[in-house]
Image (cartoon, helix red, strand yellow):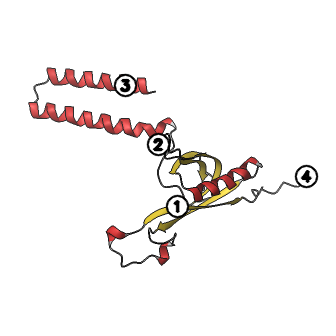
Amino acid sequence: MSLGLAICYAAVAALLLNLNLASAWSWKVKASTIALVSVLYGVSWFGIIGLEGWATEERMPERFQLQWVAIDEPDPQANAAGGIYFWIRHFEEDGRTSAPRAYALPFAEEDADAARDALALLQEGKRVEGRITMQSLDPDRERIDEEVEDAAAPPGDAPQEQPSFEFREMAPPELPPKPAL
């Protein structure tokens, strides 16, 4: 896919160069089009990364069905920070689930423990529902809920938000009634 994308970029660049050489436009218009196309190359290149199947670092939905989880422990010798990778389906408004999507989160021992417990349920063949809540991480205290945070704190001193997970076994799906024979 990347090779095809690079060939397409080169073809558009060649067409733009040909257009600029053959046109009677002012040099300002020609320079502007070259700059605009160059910026669009960068935007599309970084936008296409999400389409290649890599896990996103976007915020996870608050309620989801867990499909699988992978945990990479931090390795100080290799200078690897570690991470937790979730493959989930979020719940639509009508109760159905979406297509699976991969999410990446930085490694945290508390989250890794919850993920290990959820993985054990999955390996037993159970369906697992996950919930995520945002808690504040205050450097002077343990985790505190958002409601407890001091509203008068200056913006620069505001605690950082950290996700907290809760996993549980899902109830079996409700099947429609069978018609009477």
Q: Earlier in the sequence, mark 2 or mark 1?
A: 2
Q: CA distance from mark 3 to mark 1?
A: 38 Å
Q: Nearer the viewer, residue 82 or 55?
A: 82
* Crowd class of label 2 (few under 14; some 14 to 19; many from 20; radius 10 Å): few
Alpha-carbon span between mark 4 and mark 1: 51 Å
Tell me the SS state at disc 4. loop
- Identify the residue under disc 2: 79
The residue mark sitting in front, 2 or 1, is: 2
Please tell me which of labels 4 and 3 falls first in the chain: 3
Q: Residue at x 55, y 61 (%)?
A: 62
Disc 4 versus disc 1: nearer the observer:
1
- Amino acid marked by disc 1: Pro
Which residue in the structure is indicated by mark 4? 181
Which amino acid type is marked by label 3? Ala
Mark 4 to mark 2 CA distance (whole Å): 66 Å
Going by the image, does 91 lie left or right of 127? left
Gap between marks 2 and 1, in whole Å?
24 Å
Q: Which residue is mark 1?
A: 163
Whichever of labels 4 and 1 marks the residue nearer the N terminus, that label is: 1
| Disc nearest the viewer among 4 and 2 | 2
Report the residue marked by disc 3. Answer: 6
Secondary structure beneath dot 3 equals helix
Q: Position of residue 28 (x, y in %)?
A: 10, 34
- In the image, what residue type sits under mark 2? Asn
